[in-house]
């Protein structure tokens, strides 16, 4: 599923520190309450982990939590010291992994 | 008490005759949209209610039925509300505090949507005149009462809703409102926060580049849905891909020509209106009904294939010319409890470009169609123009007409007539 979009600058110089932005389309369910005001107990579907790999090597992983807006994005710096594949993976509480990749080239 | 309702029954026969004569050339259309958009009236707990979207801003209106007020339907038989002149009740004493509460009540109007007052209230709009020195004008209470009851009796061109004549406020409530607006006097008001006053308010710069897929989630959402729908087979085994190989992205330039007159269905259609009936005729079933998410997302994907291309609708046929005229008439048609027309909020001569509460009203000339369907950050959903129309008119006190109705297609055509030659830029992005 093409549900992750990644943005890099239009042109990249080798060794440049650039800003990467990745957006995932995801409902990011928030807590629901019943008519009695009590929290409805269930497995809420939200993303808990973001992992970034660069040519297969994990270069960053981070936590996300509930109550972040639907369709969230992350932005992070990357030192582009080699050409190759940058992959961002968002894992949610249902175990599904939402993955997108982009080629870094100079 | 309700002059309006009694007048209705009298004028009903005349109204029907007029509507039939005026609309003889308008084709018939039975809605093929999702149920929440077709919005049938049903009985619920002994009350007549209209089924509408159970989401976002529509939910608070779930049990409200506005069926006694005019709609944008070409078959509307309720006549324009007559101008009413009344006497101010003498046995009620106006109460400033009660009036202030009513003036700000969101359930009622709120008056602050269009008028600035001395109190720091958020949000105040400036569609109507500022009332900060209204009391200094020394109008008689009876005159102010009549202004609120039905302003059209004083200025026939006024587009302020006839609050008393429509039954939105009771006579007693209007007496309290009179007391409150008469209390608005004194030296110029100094605001601590410049954003309180629409004249000095910060104007939002928006939400950034709507065509950046990492900024506008609607792009990935639409691509994913369109890819899924393109492969979905109807009962006869055919898919979109059977005839339109390559997916939505291959439909370059198609969206720039819509809305247009479709001979097969003998009516003007936007892409949203066309997809359902077209699927029914080619695949054996309407698998993509209008205003459903599948429809809106797929339409968005088709429009994205024409991003940056100039809108180029062929307006030359007699059918298109007639449709455009009817669309324009709808734009100036007064509807709902508020007795408002689209033009009241979206033309420069009236409220266009001013603040309605906290939101700056877009102008017809901007144009208003090219960014639709658009992502709504507050609901995390994509809305097509029809859901927007339905949302525009609901708080005005108008029941839904179906999203895929001819009325809306022709109104959309009128809005689109201001966008010829300008680049398409869907999906939009906004709050």
Image (cartoon, rainbow, N blue to C red):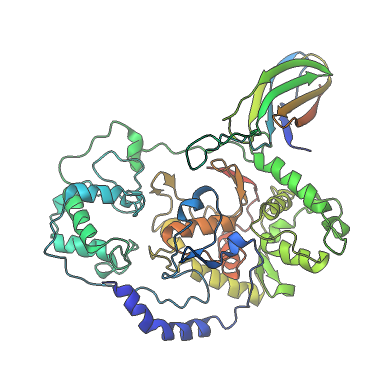
On-image quarter of the N terminus of chain A: top right
Residue at 34%, 54% in the rendered image: B109
B195 vs B40, nearest the viewer: B40
Q: Where is residue B27 in the image (x, y as percent from the top left)?
A: 63, 78
Can you tell which quarter of the image residue A21 is in?
A: top right
The residue at the point 45 percent across, 50 percent down is B361
Q: Nearer the viewer, residue B95 or B361?
A: B95
| Residue drawn at 62 percent across, 62 percent down | B35
Image check: B159 left or right of B259? left
Which quadrant holds the C terminus of chain A?
A: top right
Left or right for B236, reference B301: right
- Is there any visible trace of residue B99 in the rendered image? yes
Q: In the displayed structure, would residue B194 be above or below residue B93?
A: above
Q: Where A44 falls versus B330 (above or below)? A: above
Q: Which of B251 and B100 is in front in this view?
A: B100
Left/right placement of residue B346 relative to residue B92 reads right
Q: Is residue B67 above or below residue B193?
A: below
Note whether residue A79 is visible: no
Q: Residue at x 57, y 83 (%)?
A: B24
- x%, y% of residue B178? 19, 56
Give residue B404's position: percent from left, percent from top.
Answer: 62, 65
How many numbered dots are placed on residues in this image? 0
Q: Dividing the picture into quarters, in which one does residue B333 lie?
A: bottom left
Percent position (x, y) of residue B16?
A: 47, 83
């Amino acid at each position: 599923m093409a549900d992750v979009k990644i943005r890099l600058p239009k042109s990249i110089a080798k060794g440049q520190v650039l800003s990467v932005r990745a957006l995932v389309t995801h409902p990011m369910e928030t807590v629901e309450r019943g008519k009695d005001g009590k929290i409805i107990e269930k497995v809420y579907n939200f993303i808990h982990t973001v992992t970034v790999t660069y040519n297969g090597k994990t270069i960053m992983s981070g936590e996300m939590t509930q109550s972040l807006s639907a369709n969230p994005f992350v932005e992070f710096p990357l030192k582009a010291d080699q050409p190759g594949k940058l992959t961002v993976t968002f894992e949610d509480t249902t175990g599904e992994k939402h993955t997108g990749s982009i080629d870094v080239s100079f | 008490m309700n002059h309006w309702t009694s007048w209705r029954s009298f004028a009903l026969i005349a109204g029907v005759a007029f509507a039939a004569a005026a609309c003889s050339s308008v084709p018939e259309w039975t809605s093929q949209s999702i149920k929440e958009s077709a919005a049938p009236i049903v009985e619920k707990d002994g009350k007549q209610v209209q089924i509408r979207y159970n989401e976002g801003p529509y939910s608070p209106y779930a049990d409200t039925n506005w069926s006694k007020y005019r709609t944008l339907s070409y078959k509307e038989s309720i006549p324009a509300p007559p101008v009413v002149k009344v006497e101010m009740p003498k046995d009620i004493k106006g109460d400033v505090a009660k009036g202030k509460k009513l003036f700000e009540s969101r359930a009622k109007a709120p008056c602050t949507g269009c008028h600035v007052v001395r109190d720091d209230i958020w949000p105040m709009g400036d569609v109507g005149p500022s009332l900060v020195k209204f009391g200094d004008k020394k109008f008689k209470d009876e005159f102010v009462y009549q202004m609120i009851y039905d302003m059209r009796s004083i200025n026939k061109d006024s587009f302020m809703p006839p609050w008393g004549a429509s039954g939105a406020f009771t006579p007693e409530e209007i007496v309290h409102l009179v007391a409150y607006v008469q209390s608005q006097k004194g030296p110029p008001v100094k605001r601590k926060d410049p954003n309180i006053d629409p004249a000095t308010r910060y104007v939002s710069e928006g939400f950034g580049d709507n065509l950046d897929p990492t900024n506008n989630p609607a792009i990935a959402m639409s691509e994913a849905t369109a890819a899924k729908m393109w492969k979905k087979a109807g009962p006869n085994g055919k898919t979109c891909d059977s005839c339109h190989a390559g997916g939505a992205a291959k439909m370059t330039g198609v969206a720039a020509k819509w809305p247009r007159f479709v001979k097969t269905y003998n009516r003007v259609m936007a892409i949203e209106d066309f997809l359902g009936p077209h699927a029914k005729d080619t695949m054996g079933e309407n698998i993509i009904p209008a205003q459903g998410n599948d429809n809106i997302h797929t339409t968005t994907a088709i429009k994205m294939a024409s991003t940056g291309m100039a809108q180029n609708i062929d307006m030359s046929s007699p059918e298109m010319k007639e449709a455009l005229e009817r669309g324009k008439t709808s734009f100036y048609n007064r509807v709902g409890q508020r007795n408002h027309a689209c033009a009241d909020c979206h033309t420069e001569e009236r409220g266009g470009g001013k603040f309605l509460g906290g939101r700056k009203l877009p102008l017809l000339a901007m144009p208003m169609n090219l960014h639709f369907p658009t992502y709504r950050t507050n609901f995390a959903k994509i809305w097509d123009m029809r859901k927007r129309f339905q949302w525009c008119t609901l708080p005005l006190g108008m029941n839904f007409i179906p999203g895929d109705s001819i009325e809306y297609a022709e109104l959309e055509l009128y809005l689109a007539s201001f966008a010829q030659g300008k680049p398409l830029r869907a999906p939009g992005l906004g709050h």
